[in-house]
Amino acid sequence: MSNEIEKSMNFEDKMKERIREGIGDLITDEELSKIIDAGIREVFFTKELIHSSGYGPVKYKPSLIETVIREELDLHGRAKEVCKEWMTEHSDEITDIVDGLLRDGVGNLMMNTISEMFQSSLTAMKYDIQTNIANGMNNGY
């Protein structure tokens, strides 16, 4: 990953050098860096407007970086195949995980539901017992 950052910095530096040779000292390094950054963002990350009218959706052509990533990953082809292959190869593990989640989840859900159903009754019974004990103590029992 650090190689990618170094490559991009080298690319920027090379662009600065080439532009600096052409324009000399007309602008500062900071201004030149801002221009180069804006240019890189424009070229790689800006979507191109294809269709815009008062009716219907606005359509854009994907940015260059999106196109490169889609081509690299081939989202509609190889990536799906790889996922299917992995899931097929690991179906036993996936089944065990899903079974565990369902078993534990359903069990916990049932216990929580039962607990909530009886909670008010148990609280009322506890209050009645405490009241009876207190009344019994007051009556000399």
Image (cartoon, rainbow, N blue to C red):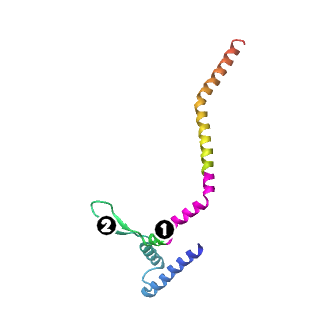
Q: Is residue 72 left or right of residue 113?
A: left
Q: Quadrant of residue 138?
A: top right
Q: Amino acid at mark 1?
A: Gly
Q: CA distance from mark 1 to mark 2?
A: 27 Å
Residue 57 percent coordinates (x, y):
33, 61
Question: Crowding at label 2, few (<14), some or many (≥20) Cα neighbours within 10 Å?
Answer: few
Q: Quadrant of the C terminus?
A: top right
Residue beneath label 1, please?
A: 77
**Residue at the (49%, 84%) spot, across then down:** 17
Range drawn in magenta: 72-97
Name the foreground residue: 27 vs 136.
Answer: 136
Name the foreground residue: 94 vs 105.
Answer: 94
**Lower sequence index among marks 1 and 2:** 2
Residue beneath label 2, please?
A: 51
Any magenta on residue 118?
no
The chief SS type of the magenta part is: helix
Q: Quadrant of residue 133?
A: top right
Please, which residue is most extreme toward the left here?
54
Q: Is residue 139 above or below residue 118?
A: above
Q: Is residue 54 above or below residue 34?
A: above
Residue 134 percent coordinates (x, y):
68, 18
Residue 12 percent coordinates (x, y):
50, 79
Q: Quadrant of residue 115?
A: top right
Q: Amino acid at mark 2?
A: His
Q: Is residue 5 left or right of residue 31?
A: right
Q: Secondary structure at mark 1?
A: loop
